[in-house]
Amino acid sequence: MTKLPSIGKPISRLEGHFKVTGSAKYAGEYDVPDLLYGYVVNSTITKGRIKIIDTAGAKALEGVIEVFTHENRPSTAWFDFQYADMDAPPGTVFKPLKDNEIKYNGQPIALVVATTFEMARYAATLIKTAYAEKEFETDLESNLEKAREPKKGLASMLKPPPAKPTGNFEEAYRNSFVQSSGEFKHGTEHHNPMEMFATTVVYEGKNKLKIYDKTQGTINSQMYVANVFGLKMKNVQVIAPYVGGAFGSGLRPQYQLFMAVMASFKLKRNVRVTLDRSQMFTFGHRPPTLQFTKFGADENGKVNAIYHEAIAETSQFEDYVENVVNWSNMLYPAENTLLEHKLVPLDVYSPLDMRAPGGSTGIHAIEITMDDLAYQLNIDPLELRLINYSEKDKSSDKEYSSKELRNCYLQGAEKFGWKNRNPEPRNMKRGNKLIGYGMATGIWDANRLLARVQAIMTSDGKVELKSAVTDIGTGTLTIMTQIASDELGIPLEDITFSYADSAMPFAPIQGGSFTTATVGPAVKASCKALKEKLFRKAKNLRSSVLSDAKFEDVVFSEGFIFLKENAEVKISIDEIFTFNEGKEIKTTNAAMPNPLVYGKKARAVHSAVFVEVEVDEELGIIEVKRAVTAVAAGKIINPKTAESQILGGMIWGISKTLHEETILDDQFGKYMNANLAEYHIPVHADIHELDVIFVEENDDFVNDLGVKGVGEIGIVGMPPAIANAIFHATGKRIHNLPIHFDQLL
Ligand code: MOS
């Protein structure tokens, strides 16, 4: 039995064993009787329409049950009305097989359903398609004249538009003691989680479906299916206990879900649709983005003028926006600011949130511009951040609920050995290799939404909690169990957290680093309500020794309710259940931020990142030899799973900076490296020493657990810290991502 308290302990994932032994089942792995397999056919042109789609050859094969195209797809209510999803940007959601129009390369145009996956995939090769092609535009830089303001959609607190200009940027910049300006170009990236998108639909009879889906939100997928197919919510159950990575790609229902449900519903059969790796490049990506910065500072290093503009790709049907340019206001409030974010609609699929969407883009440009200012001023880059340190978020003019960024800088610098840095570029060497030290700040929102949780205690004193929330690999199952354990005063082993089932109480999509801060308080609230129920029952026992006690006067521990003042006065949980005739005791409770109070303070997590690179100019190798990330994110429930989140983010930061990019050939409008052989990600040999520090941060404002959330914060500071270290090593300032060695020549 693990000892209490559970919170704060580095407990290994409770489901880890199932994952590493292969017994964890993912969406495409459920054993379902008489299963049919779907394979999707994708458009090979970028824009135009389908003139002919000939499915006769495919249909003639034995084992092929049906081929769905825009010509024979079942009609659903959705084709006449708008329903999007919880993460849909403003615009018109893409509807697979709606009609013969092609909007992007890789668009799904048919679904082959067969008795085996192999047969479906082979049959797909026999489908003959004739297109009428139209001219298309897929290149951001040659279409900048089309840049425009994003359409207004539902105002999202998670993605605020650029803050209004303040002061007079032009004049302040012109008169600044030092000025730094830069142009930054980021390539496209695709999520590429290990698990590819898959949906298994169990046809349970007329109008009723059970769906195993790869998703970050079971209720998001449930609502989507119910709305799109005109079903009752209670007749659609979506289950997703194991998710093999998602990083934002599962925030929106993807087309395999639509295809699988459509086929299942029409054929009244169980159907599975699995995408292959190249198809993982056909439904959303981090958008290529151009950025322009101009920062001005006075002779003391105080930044007084900030201009930050982003121009990003979107599709022709949705206006995907993310927060790229607001971060400077949150980190280094200047009196004179001008922030802009524009979109260029191109003939591609809509971009999609990818870990730290916007943040990992914008903070890169901000932190490199700051580094350049530091060099111009001859001030240590860390010192420049401290000179511009702010307790307030300028965009909302509010104090932070807590901000231990200063300690992140100090503890990170100490651990890294920042003081050993010779500030002069090209002056630190190891053998014939150049060494560079670079640093950067990271920031991400600390948000919280509404969630509900049910708590059920059975007569053996064990507790089951239920929530629709998913665990996309973040450790949610473990963390929620820890929170319940401490609140109830019972060991982890006696608690079951049941989750990732849309039939369970509401939780939003898992994303934005807000799950622990959202579902955690609901777990706590339902456990507290459960204790109150037990306590009331204890008081009502005949000649109860607690009849005069108040709830505040008792503690729950080891199967008893004790009087705090006198542990001799107690009632056992057993006794309560005997009185309750062995019936379970349950309660469902919601938790959400108090709308009257929550907006009164700014809320963010912070990090300071320190990186050592080694550059071999002869062999053309750039390596990140060491990195330290110090994070302030409020209370850390589980230092082990939290550290894993940060390490994953740091590795992705290295990947984003030195490896990852999807290359689109504008002649064809098609991604040319849509596979894992040519879409580069780091291997073990690319990753060296990584350290994570969690700086103590107490925050009783964000929620009653004091948690802010860790996830995105791991990636945001890495790309600029690496780029700054490369400058320090080589004297060359590279603004674009990814950085390849030829840029240093
Ligand atoms: Mo994250 S982009 O919210 O998975």
Image (cartoon, rainbow, N blue to C red):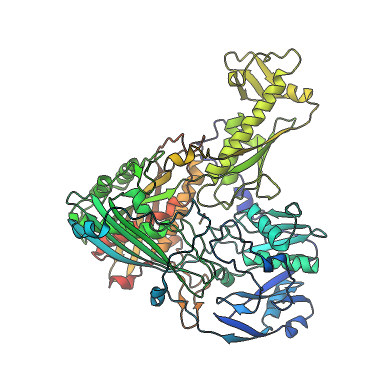
186 and 144: which one is in front? 144
Q: Is residue 428 visible?
A: no
Q: Is residue 279 visible?
A: yes
| Number of numbered callouts drawn | 0
Q: Residue at x 68, y 73 (%)?
A: 39
Q: Quadrant of the C terminus?
A: bottom left
**Residue 722 location, x and y as percent?**
34, 59
339 and 563: which one is in front? 339
Residue 462, relative to residue 217: is it above or below?
above
**Residue 361 location, x and y as percent?**
40, 60
Q: Quadrant of the N terminus?
A: top right
Side (left or right) of 575 relative to 514: right
643 and 50: which one is in front? 50
**Residue 73 location, x and y as percent?**
73, 74
Residue 143, relative to residue 274: is it above or below?
below
Side (left or right) of 723 relative to 678: left
Q: Residue at x 25, y 52 (%)?
A: 303
Q: Quadrant of residue 127?
A: bottom right
Residue 620, relative to residue 684: is it above or below?
below
108 and 26: which one is in front? 108
